[in-house]
């Protein structure tokens, strides 16, 4: 009989990106859409953003992460995975909640691109005014 492996699941969202995140006890491997985080994200800043929940709670190297992202771009994916990891960490260790909440990692960032309005060039940019 194989022992059932413990997995914690959480959803993270940022801009239009949605990340489904699974957290399992392990060695600290982070996989996003089937690729290692370093290869998938491509930027050190985004990689640091994804690792932030672990760094803040001193749980680096204790969990493996598998994330599936869709919608938006790389930056949105990184933010969504970060939020998913934070929420899954709270499931695994409820005592970490105040620390993560204080940094605002658990809260959904509501900033989304504003829609373009008719009679304008972009969301707010009007066409150039002609005086004569």
Image: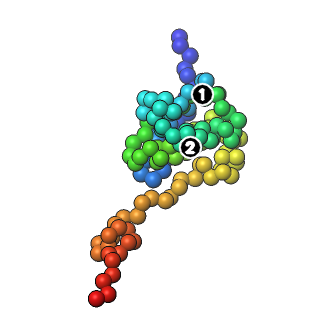
Q: Nearer the viewer, residue 131 or 27?
A: 131
Name the residue at 53% across, 42% down.
Answer: 46
Residue depicted at 50% across the width and 43% down the height? 78
Badge 1: how crowded within 10 Å, few (<14), some, or many (20+)? some
Q: Which of pointers 2 and 1 lies earlier in the amino acid sequence?
A: 1
Residue 116 appears left or right of 91: left
Q: Position of residue 14 (x, y in %)?
A: 48, 50
Quadrant of residue 97 in the image?
A: top right
Q: Nearer the viewer, mark 2 or mark 1?
A: 2
Instruction: Work out whether 97 lies above or below 54.
Output: below
- At 46% from the left and 48% from the top, the residue drawn is 76
Residue 121 point in image, percent of width and height? 32, 70
Task: Identify the mark at residue 45; answer none if there is no mark.
Answer: 2
**Residue 67 seen in this snapshot:** no
Residue 99 in the image: above or below residue 122? above
- Image quarter where the C terminus lies is bottom left
Residue 15: which numbered mark, if any?
A: none
Q: Nearer the viewer, residue 39 or 57?
A: 39
The residue that appears at 70% across and 46% down in the rendered structure is 99
Disc 2 packing (10 Å; few <14; some 14–19; many ≥20): few
The x and y percentages for residue 104 are: 62, 52
- Rounded to the nearest whole Å, what is the CA distance between mark 2 and mark 1? 18 Å
- From this viewpoint, is residue 41 visible? yes
Q: Residue furthest bottom?
A: 132
Please give the count of numbered marks on the rendered protein. Answer: 2
81 or 91, nearer to the observer? 81
Question: For numbered disc 2, what is the local secondary structure?
Answer: helix
Q: Residue furthest top?
A: 1
**Image-quadrant location for residue 56:** top right
Q: Is residue 116 found left or right of 96 in the rendered image?
A: left
Q: Is residue 105 above or below residue 68?
A: below
> Mark 1 — residue?
28
């Amino acid at each position: 009989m194989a022992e059932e492996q413990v997995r914690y699941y959480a959803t993270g969202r940022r801009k239009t990106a949605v990340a489904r995140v699974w957290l399992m006890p392990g060695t600290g491997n982070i996989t996003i859409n089937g690729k290692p985080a370093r290869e998938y994200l491509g930027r050190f800043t985004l990689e640091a953003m994804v690792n932030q929940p672990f760094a803040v709670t001193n749980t680096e190297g204790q969990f493996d992460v598998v994330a599936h992202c869709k919608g938006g771009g790389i930056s949105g994916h990184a933010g969504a995975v970060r939020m998913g990891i934070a929420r899954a960490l709270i499931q695994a260790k409820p005592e970490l909640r105040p620390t993560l909440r204080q940094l605002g990692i658990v809260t959904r960032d509501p900033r989304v691109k504003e829609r373009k309005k008719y009679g304008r060039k972009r969301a707010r940019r009007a066409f150039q005014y002609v005086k004569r």
